[in-house]
Amino acid sequence: MKRRIRVKNLGLQPYQPVWQKMQQFTHQRHQETPSEIWIVEHPAVFTLGQAGKPEHVLNQGEIPLVQTDRGGQVTYHGPGQLVLYTLLNLHNFNIGVRSLVEMLENSVIDFLATHDIKANADRNAPGVYVDGKKIAALGLKIRKGNSYHGLSFNIDMDLAPFRQINPCGYQGLEVTQLRDQGVIMSVNDVATDVLTLLADKLDGDLEFND
C-alpha cells in the first residue's frame, strides 16, 4: 500500500519561521500523521549545520547567518533555488537515513539525466555534482524516526554568495545550477518532476496541497 505524502508549496518564505514550523510539525506528529514535503524558496541566507564551523563563512557581508539543527556545514539559500523539506516518517517507508539521502540524490540525478546532463553523488560528501561542481546539497535532521530539513537544488539564481563561504565545508568547491547546464525551467516545474521521481522511489502517493 502506497503511503500518502502531502505536498505543500510555500512559495518564497523567510528561513527561520519555516525551520520553526518544521520543528513544531515534527515534535507534534504521531504515528498516523501523514508525511509531508514542503516546496519553498528562501530570501538570501547562509545556514550553518549543527556541528558547522563558523570559519567556513569567509565573508558574511549583509547576508543573515542562521545556526540551525540540520547535519552538514554551511550553505547558501536564495531565490531561484528549489528547497524540498522532507518531513517523513521513515518507519512508514521502511527506510533509514542513508536510504533517504540516496533517494534524494538519485531523484536529482535521474531528473538531470532526462535533460541529458550526467551527474553523480559522492558518498563522502553528500549532494549531487555535475563535472565536479555541486548543483544540489543535502542536510537532514532525524528525530525519533522522523526526518526534516532536506534538499536544495540550484535552478536559476545568483551563485555569487557561494563564493563568500566554503560550500558544505569544502574550500574551493565550485557550484553550478540548472540554467548554466542549458535547461531553463521554473522552480515549481522542477519541483514537480523531482518529486514524482522521489515518490516512485519511496513508493509514495503525492497529494498536492497549495
Image (cartoon, rainbow, N blue to C red):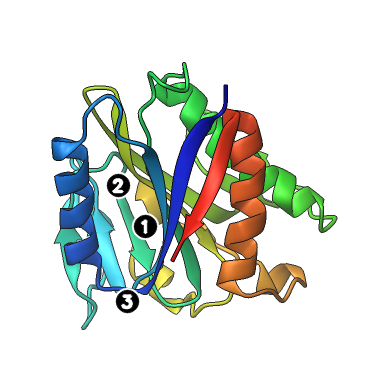
Report the Cα–Cα distance between label 1 and label 3.
16 Å
Residue 57 shows in the view: no
Q: Is residue 126 left or right of residue 86?
A: right
Q: Which residue is mark 2?
A: 73
Of the two numbered discs 2 and 3 in the rendering, the one whose residue sits closer to the viewer: 3
The answer to which of 29 and 198 lies nearer the viewer is 29
Report the Cα–Cα distance between label 1 and label 2.
9 Å
Locate residue 108, reporting x and y percent: 63, 48
- Neighbor class of circle 2 (other Cα within 10 Å; few <14, some 14-19, many 20+) is many
Dot 1 falls on a residue whose secondary structure is: loop
Q: Which residue is mark 3?
A: 44
Report the Cα–Cα distance between label 2 and label 3.
17 Å
Label 3 sits on what residue type? Ala
Label 1 sits on what residue type? Asn
Residue 115 shows in the view: yes
Q: Which residue is mark 1?
A: 166
The answer to which of 119 and 38 lies nearer the viewer is 38
Locate residue 97, reporting x and y percent: 40, 25
The answer to the question of whether label 1 and label 2 lie on touching residues, with beta carbons closer than 8 A, is: yes
Q: Is residue 148 left or right of residue 156?
A: left
- Measuring 36% from the left and 65% from the top, which residue is drawn there? 76
The answer to which of 51 and 196 lies nearer the viewer is 196
Dot placed on the residue nearer the N-terminal end, 2 or 3: 3
- Measuring 53% from the left and 28% from the top, which residue is drawn there? 123
